[in-house]
Amino acid sequence: DALAALGGATLPKKGQEDYEATDLEKVFAPDYGVNINRVPFAPDAAASFRCDVPNMSTCLYFFFNDIFAESRTAARNTQAGLVIESFADAQKNHPEVLQKHLGSLADLKKPEVALNTLLAQDGMLIYVPKGMVVEKPIQLVNIFKAAAPVMALRRILVVLEEGAQAKMLVCDHTQDAEHDYLASQVVEIVAERGSMFDYYDLEESSESTHRVSSIFVRQAEESNVLIDGITLLNGITRNDYYVNIDGEHAETHLLGMTVASARQHVDNHTFISHNVARCESNEMFKYVLNDQSVGAFAGKVLVKENCPRTVAYQGNRNIVASADAKMYSKPQLEIYTDDVKCSHGSATGQLNEEALFYMRSRGISEAEARQLLMQAFMSDVIDAVRLPALKDRLHHLVEKRFRGQLAMCADCTAANCAAAK
């Protein structure tokens, strides 16, 4: 199906609909290698790399380029009954889950999704059985390291049965910046009735690391899904979010924040479809852009016919702190029913000069005042995090980023990262 979908299709170019700011054809153009022969990672790689959140114990797993692996502590930290395994193992242990859900949400009409589906050779299954509340967050660390430019094809399937609850933290890192890397990633999230799932996505890689990510979500009645994407260091990033709300009284919270400088490029595209009555979505994306960085946000909220009492909010707020930085914004609402509460808005500007003047009059330097105002601007996106230890950690990382003290692999411990710090 993926091969047929590709057919004569080409990757989107800059200027096409929904790609006003990003040229995916250019992103995929370099001669990236693909790990067809499944060259394994070093046996001690998992032991040598840690990406810790202070005061938070996690079930830790890895993608080394696109080879899935568990940490040495994963077995004892993973709750009984919770399934976290590679697709290869799931094919033997839980084939019915893969057969029912894998590929059920991913849109093969998107060339980048079809390409991932065609070439990805393995992936990660997270299966949370009915009624299970996963006590520890699931942490996935994506690591790039290779002797040549490489494209990693990563695939994640998350299935939460009725009443299940889980939280997940995904961290992107690059162990060296000597080569160009491209992550092609497709995530499918199935949230059944009354389930709750948090997905926190932290991109902290390098200027030579690019990412094309597509996240597809389907929500049943009374489910609650929160997605919070944070980009601090990267090269070119394109994130697509597609959410179908298929059950009444479901809630979607879709948040994102970007801190960009140099030539970083971050493009977030969202689509939330309200397919039934009495459901709610809240969306907010924020950017702080400096130097020659580029930010883009395009979001659409669709409220279909016969969906009364829908509540939907979409917001995009941006600070452009440099004359050479660029921000593209395209918020959209399409409503085909009555008796709804829906709004959207976008604002792009600079820091409040009156607030700067007030802070400087109180003895705060201009540089410090700017940093404090930018941190305050981003605080609501971080405060939405429902893991207190992670919330504190993100405030710390964002502060370091604004102070120019955050390097790739910052605060991780890895023998192979030592030279990069």
Image (cartoon, helix red, strand yellow):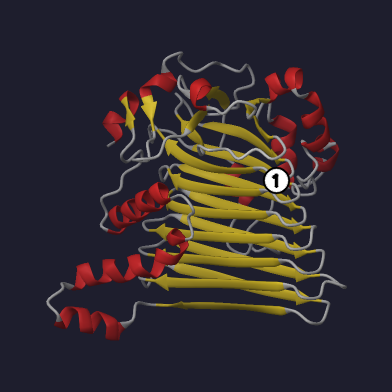
Q: Residue furthest bottom?
A: 354
Q: Residue furthest front?
A: 131
Closer to us: 214 or 363? 363
Closer to us: 105 or 245? 245
Question: Image height check: is 132 above or below 221?
Answer: above
- The percent coordinates of residue 156 (x first, y second) are 65, 36
Q: Residue furthest top?
A: 43
- The percent coordinates of residue 36 (x first, y second) are 64, 21
Closer to us: 154 or 338? 338
| Residue occupying image coordinates x 79% and y 58% | 247
- The percent coordinates of residue 338 (x first, y second) are 82, 82
The amino acid type, in three-letter code, at marker 1 is Gly
**Residue 115 lies in quadrant:** top right
Q: Secondary structure at mark 1?
A: loop
- The percent coordinates of residue 364 (x first, y second) are 15, 73
| Residue occupying image coordinates x 47% and y 37% | 180
Question: Image height check: is 391 above or below 118?
Answer: below
Q: Quadrant of the N terminus?
A: top right
Q: Is residue 277 left or right of residue 178?
A: right
**Residue 242 lies in quadrant:** bottom right
> Dot 1: within a 10 Å radius of its alpha carbon, few (fewer than 14), some, or many (20 or more) residues?
some
Q: Is residue 251 left or right of residue 182?
A: right
Q: Which residue is mark 1?
A: 163
Q: Is residue 153 left or right of residue 170?
A: right
Q: Residue furthest left?
A: 363
Residue 193 shows in the view: yes
| Residue occupying image coordinates x 65% and y 27% | 81
Q: Quadrant of the C terminus?
A: top left
Question: Image height check: is 327 above or below 112?
Answer: below
Q: How many marks?
A: 1
Residue 324 shows in the view: no
